[in-house]
Image: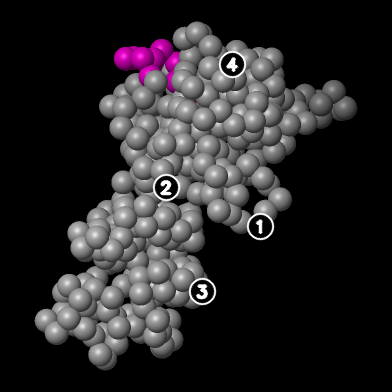
Amino acid sequence: MKQAAVEYVLRQLGVSQMKASGNQLMIACPLAPWTHASGQDRNPSMGVTLGSGMSVVNCFACKFSGGLLSLVREIGKHRIADGSWMRENVEQLQAYIMLREEEDDELHIEEEDILPVPEFLIDGLGFYHPYFAKRNISPETAALWRLGYYDFAEGGRVLFPIIARDGEIIGIQARRVDDSLGIPKYKNFPPGVKKSRYLYGEHLLRNKQTVLIAVESQAGTVKANQILKTREEFAVGLMGSNPSQEQVDKLVAWGDEVVVFLDNDPAGIKGGQTLVDMLKERVYTTIVKYPPGTDGYDPDDLGEEGFLSCLNNRVSVVEAELHKRLKSWLAPQEERLKFEVTL
Ligand SMILES: [Zn+2]
C-alpha cells in the first residue's frame, strides 16, 4: 500500500509519529497497551512496509507479524472489548485497506490474512441498480444471482457475489458504475480471495450438466445464462482468462461436454488455448469460432442471436485439429496440382 494510505490507516489506529526508513515506516507499536509488558513502546519497534500490494507489519518487541489488515483486526478486538470502538470502525478501516491494496495480489496474500466478506457488502446484495438495466440484466436475473450495489466513498460499485457450490459467499467482486473515474474498475473482497478455486456460477449448477460453457467474466456469465434460459447448457465463469487447475478439475467433474467460449482478444485467445490443452484429454471439449470482424469482442458483445449461433456452430477439438491437419496436408497437394496444370 502507498505511504499516504498507510499513514491514514495508522493515524486511525492512534499512531501520530511515523518515521520512514527504507521501504518501511517505523512506528511505536499500537498494540503496546495490550501486548507490551510496560503498556507502551518508547523506541518505535514496529515496521510497516510500503509499496504496491499488501503492507506487512512486524513488531520486534511483541513479535506481532502479519498484514495491515490483521493489525486492524487485532486492535479492533481489543478496542471493541474495552468499548472504545464499534464493529463499524473496524469494518470501515478494513474496507479502506482492501480498496487501497491492489486487486491482483492474490499470490502475495497468506491464507490467514484472508478475512471474511465484509458484512456491509453482503447487506448491499439484492439491490437492483440501473447499471444492470443498462447491461440488459433483468431484475429477475439480478435477483437469481444475488447481484447488488454499494455506495463506496470513492463512488458506487455493483456487486457480483462469488458463491461456492455449497452456497457460501466466498467473495464479492465490486465493479465501478462510473467508468470515468481514475480508480480501479474492479475490486475483490476480501482482498486475496482465492477466486481461482471456484467457477463463477457453480452454486446454480444442477447435479450433472450435459454442457458447460466456460466464459471469462462475472457479468458475462450472468448474461450468457440469461440468454440460455432453460436450455441444457449452463455457463460458468473463470473470473479471468487464465484457467487454474482447480477450475479445470471442476469443469471435468461437472460437465459431459465443455465449450470453450472465452473473449476474442489476445488474453482470451491465449487462455482459451491453455484451457483446451488442459481439458481435451479429460473431457469432450468443443470450441466456439467468432465470426470475422469481431476482434476484441467478448461473448456478450455478439448479442443474443450471435451468441446462440456461435454456440450452435461449435466444433469439437478433434474436428478442429483434423481440419488443421487436412489443410496443411492439402496445401502442398494443391500447390503440386497447380504446378502440374501449368506444365
Ligand atoms: Zn508490539
The residue singled out by tag 1 in the image is 182
Q: Which range of residues does the magenta coloring cover?
A: 205-214
Spatial separation of the CA atoms under disc 1 and disc 3: 17 Å
At x 64%, y 20%, the residue is 307
Q: Is residue 53 magenta?
A: no
Amino acid type, callout 2: Phe
The residue singled out by tag 4 in the image is 227
- Quick check: 198 left or right of 285? left
Q: Is residue 209 magenta?
A: yes
Q: Closer to the N terminus: mark 2 or mark 3? A: 3
114 or 143, which is in the foreground? 143
The residue singled out by tag 2 in the image is 189
Q: For the residue labelled by badge 4, is the local secondary structure a helix, a strand or a loop?
A: helix
Binning the other alpha carbons within 10 Å of mark 3 as few (below 14), some (14 to 19) or many (20 upward) gives few
**Image position, residue 133 (x, y; %):** 65, 26
Amino acid type, callout 1: Gly
Q: For the residue labelled by badge 2, is the local secondary structure a helix, a strand or a loop?
A: strand
Amino acid type, callout 4: Ile
Q: Residue furthest bottom?
A: 43
35 or 280, which is in the foreground? 35
Q: Closer to the N terminus: mark 4 or mark 2? A: 2
Residue 22 shows in the view: no
Instruction: Indicate if the residue with disc 4 has its beta carbon within 8 Å of ligand 1.
Output: no
At x 30%, y 32%, the residue is 168
Spatial separation of the CA atoms under disc 1 and disc 2: 20 Å
Residue 191 shows in the view: yes
The residue singled out by tag 3 in the image is 4
**Image position, residue 87 (x, y; %):** 31, 53
